[in-house]
């Protein structure tokens, strides 16, 4: 029998309630953005009944573990978290005995939608490799919402994710943060008010693409850094021209309006603090150099991605409040990954740095909880005690911080978005499965209910005719 997924998807995409409207980013200067309303989020949360999950082990995402506790959700937000919660009239009760509740998992580094399944050249929209600086492109303009990977990730407890351009360029373009809900357009998935990021890259990737393959700039790590500095110097001049133009409007109405440059729009907003940098960087020495460049031009690096040598400069990252978005154990697949160690997260944690476990993988995103479990086990083996209440932060609170959405999601607290997962057991067990996944309080995945296991139109469209007959 065919699953009634299409109706569910339409409801999820359209929604019935008003969207969250409080922006996380500052008001946008008209000079640096498209026309008002263009490319904005059209995401609406689904109107859903209030729910109380009871008798569960609750990991709040901020370092606390509550045993035999509950979470009460109403009108898309968390109303209360704690022990002894009683169900008010009209509240649906879910018995969490023997089960665990966590915030919804957030993947800070994904290419779902821009490198979707099936993996064919026609779908490769993640890397605009035509120039070392393509800061003008936006990942959201290449996202295919029908990527089956979104559904598989949701079944793994992923409620939000950052989709980035690839890492061929020094400046790859803007990132976008999505709510992981079935939708027909990327705008209907965009996390309301989440700021853009800027994907940058250093090391072997730009050298290989432009130097070794194309015989053009940059060919060396020296060229990488020179490319960053030249671009931000140009962006600083561009920003100053627009400031002078804005200031002149009260006095000199005839001062010509500067010509708009989409590439420099993005870089100027980085300098203004409205877009944070997410920098693909493996080696410790290069991360330190990137921080020097950021200091020179006055912008912020939110997170170093992959960062296999982050443990070597854990104190520096902690001092600069820069997150390290890392794998649990990937290493050795190229020279700059050769010094990757399983204890990377543990050493960063001990130094007080912000640790994030990310996927960078359409399959790894489906088991991000297991990746964090591996990193937690490595920490405990070396004598750095990390328990579940701490490790869950690597998948919830810390990525929310790096993406600029920590005020809205990433922890279970009153007033936060009701993005949460009910697991059938300790989520750090290799046997753990997400039983129920809620986004803004709406049940978007239920392992026991086929009607709440969305499949994209793409997957439904390729089934043989006999498989879809009632």
Image (cartoon, rainbow, N blue to C red):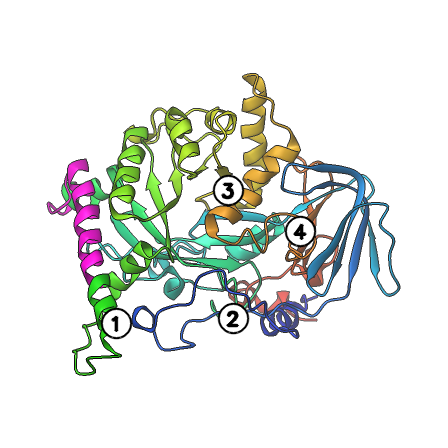
- Location of residue 115 by image quarter: bottom left
Closer to viewer: mark 4 or mark 3: 4
Instruction: Answer with left or right where residue 83 lies relative to residue 384.
Output: right
Q: Earlier in the sequence, mark 1 or mark 2?
A: 2
Q: CA distance from mark 4 to mark 3?
A: 19 Å
The residue identified by callout 4 is 420
State which quadrant residue 446 falls in. Answer: bottom right
Residue drawn where x is 32% and y is 29% of the image: 284
Q: Secondary structure at mark 1?
A: helix
Left or right relative to 216: residue 143: right
Nearer the camera: disc 3 or disc 1: 1
Where is residue 23 shown, x and y percent of the image? 50, 64
User: How many residues crowd around disc 1 within 10 Å: few (fewer than 14), some, or many (20 or more)?
Assistant: few
Gap in Å between the C-alphas at discs 4 and 2? 23 Å
Q: Label 2: which residue?
A: 184
Mark 2, other Cα within 10 Å: few <14 / some 14–19 / many ≥20: some
Secondary structure beneath label 2: loop
Circle 1 residue: 247
N-term-proximal mark, 4 vs 1:
1
Which residues are drawn in magenta? 212-238
Please name the residue that numbered disc 3 is placed on. Answer: 364
Q: Are marks 4 and 3 in contact (CB under 8 Å)?
A: no
């Amino acid at each position: 029998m065919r699953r009634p997924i299409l109706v569910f998807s339409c409801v999820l995409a359209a929604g019935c309630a008003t969207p969250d409207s409080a922006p996380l980013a500052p008001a946008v200067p008209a000079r640096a953005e498209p026309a008002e309303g263009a490319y904005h989020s059209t995401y609406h949360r689904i109107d859903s009944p209030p729910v109380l999950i009871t008798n569960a082990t609750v990991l709040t995402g901020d370092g606390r573990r509550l045993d035999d506790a509950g979470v009460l959700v109403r009108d898309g937000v968390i109303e209360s978290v704690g022990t002894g919660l009683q169900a008010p009239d009209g509240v649906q009760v879910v018995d969490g005995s023997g089960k665990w509740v966590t915030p919804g998992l957030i993947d800070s580094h994904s290419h779902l939608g821009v490198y979707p399944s099936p993996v064919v050249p026609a779908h490769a929209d993640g890397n605009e490799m035509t120039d070392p600086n393509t800061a003008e492109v936006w990942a959201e303009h290449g996202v295919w919402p029908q990527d089956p990977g979104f559904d598989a990730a949701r079944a793994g407890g992923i409620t939000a994710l950052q989709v980035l351009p690839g890492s061929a360029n020094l400046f790859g373009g803007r990132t976008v943060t999505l709510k992981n809900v079935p939708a027909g357009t990327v705008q209907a998935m965009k996390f309301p008010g989440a700021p853009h990021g800027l994907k940058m890259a250093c090391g072997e990737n730009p050298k290989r693409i432009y130097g070794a393959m194309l015989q053009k700039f940059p060919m060396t790590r020296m060229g990488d850094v020179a490319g960053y500095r030249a671009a931000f110097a140009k962006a600083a001049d561009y920003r100053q021209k627009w400031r002078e133009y804005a200031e002149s409007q009260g006095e000199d109405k005839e001062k010509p309006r500067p010509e708009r440059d989409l590439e420099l729009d993005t870089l100027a907003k980085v300098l203004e603090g409205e877009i944070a940098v997410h920098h693909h960087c493996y080696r410790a020495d290069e991360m330190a150099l990137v921080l020097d460049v950021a200091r020179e031009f006055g912008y912020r690096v939110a997170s170093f991605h992959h960062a296999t040598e982050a443990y070597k400069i854990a104190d520096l990252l902690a001092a600069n409040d820069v997150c390290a978005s890392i794998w649990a154990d990937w290493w050795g697949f190229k020279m700059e990954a050769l010094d990757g160690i399983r204890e990377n997260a543990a050493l960063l944690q001990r130094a007080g740095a912000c640790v994030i476990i990310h996927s960078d993988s359409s399959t790894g995103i489906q088991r991000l909880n297991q990746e964090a479990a591996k990193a937690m086990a490595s920490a405990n083996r070396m004598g750095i005690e990390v328990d579940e209440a701490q490790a869950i932060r690597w998948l919830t609170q810390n990525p929310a911080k790096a993406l600029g959405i920590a005020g809205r999601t990433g922890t279970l607290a009153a007033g936060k978005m009701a993005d949460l997962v009910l697991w059938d057991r300790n989520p750090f067990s290799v046997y753990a499965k997400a039983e129920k996944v809620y986004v803004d309080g709406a049940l978007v995945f239920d392992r026991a209910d086929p009607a709440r296991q969305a499949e994209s139109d793409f997957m439904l469209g390729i089934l043989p005719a006999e498989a879809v007959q009632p």
